[in-house]
Image (cartoon, rainbow, N blue to C red):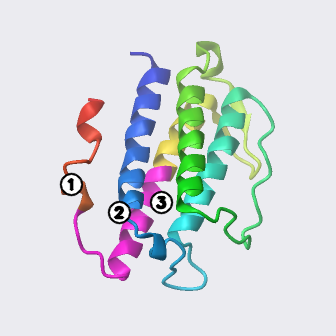
Amino acid sequence: MSFQKDTATNYLTQVDLFKVTLEKTPSDKLQWKPDPNSMSAQEMVEHLTGSQYFFAALIKGEDPPAPPPSDSTPKVKTREQLLKDFQQSCDMMAKTIGSAPDKSLDTPIKLPFGHTVKTRFIMTVPGFHATYHWGQLSYVQKMWGDNKDHMTDPSFPLGGRY
């Protein structure tokens, strides 16, 4: 398997961790925050959705879209639209990672916050980013009293890709 296809597969698995936990989040808890300065589940999803387009632009050698202001309020009002937008961004991200040309892998990318990295590194970041927020979402669920281990749920999707 190529680096691109392997990275896309890993990305989808990492996103699945987040999605399974999100699916177990009750609708009435999507905007719940343990603290006014933290992110709700909905804000995490919107943040991940927007960041996919940022990372995809970098991988494609394009100028990334400007990030939304950190004090922006959630834009999506329905659970269905939130999940649909997130899924579309995940599908786009996996396609972008999987179809990146070999010749671009070692292309240096100057990030907006100053560092320069290779494209192959940026291709791994969306998966780590989703895993980071999966941990946050799991912790937030525990804070509102959901102590179930959702990874033992039979619907957990890890087995299908490896």
At label 3, counting other C-alpha atoms closer than 10 Å, the crowd grade (few under 14, some 14-19, many 20 or more) is many
**Image check: 17 left or right of 59?**
left
In the rendered structure, which segment of residues is drawn in magenta?
A: 130-149
Residue shown at 43% from the left, 37% from the top: 12
Residue drawn 75% across the image and 55% down it: 67
Residue type at mark 2 is Lys
> Viewer-proximal residue, 162 or 76?
76
Pointer 2: what residue? 24
Q: How crowded is mark 2: few (under 14 residues within 10 Å), some or many (20 or more)?
A: few
Question: Image quarter for residue 82?
Answer: bottom right
Q: Where is residue 98 in the image (x, y as percent from the top left)?
A: 52, 23
Q: Which of marks 1 and 2 is nearer the N terminus?
A: 2
Viewport quadrant of the C terminus: top left
> Residue beneath label 1, please?
153
- Which circle, 3 or 1, is nearer the viewer? 1
Relative height, residue 44 to residue 52 (above, below): below
In percent of the image, x 50 and y 67: which residue is there?
A: 41
Residue closest to the eye, 161 or 129: 161
Q: Could you give the CA–CA distance between mark 3 and mark 1, rounded to whole angstroms? A: 20 Å
Q: Could you tell me which residue is drawn at 62 percent across and 30 percent down?
A: 119
Mark earlier in primary sequence (3, 1)? 3
- Residue 159 sits inside the magenta stretch: no
User: Disc 3 or 2, which lies upstream in sequence?
Assistant: 2
79 over 103 or under it: above or below? below
Q: What type is the residue that disc 3 sits on?
A: His
23 left or right of 93 in image: left
Where disc 1 sits, the SS reads loop
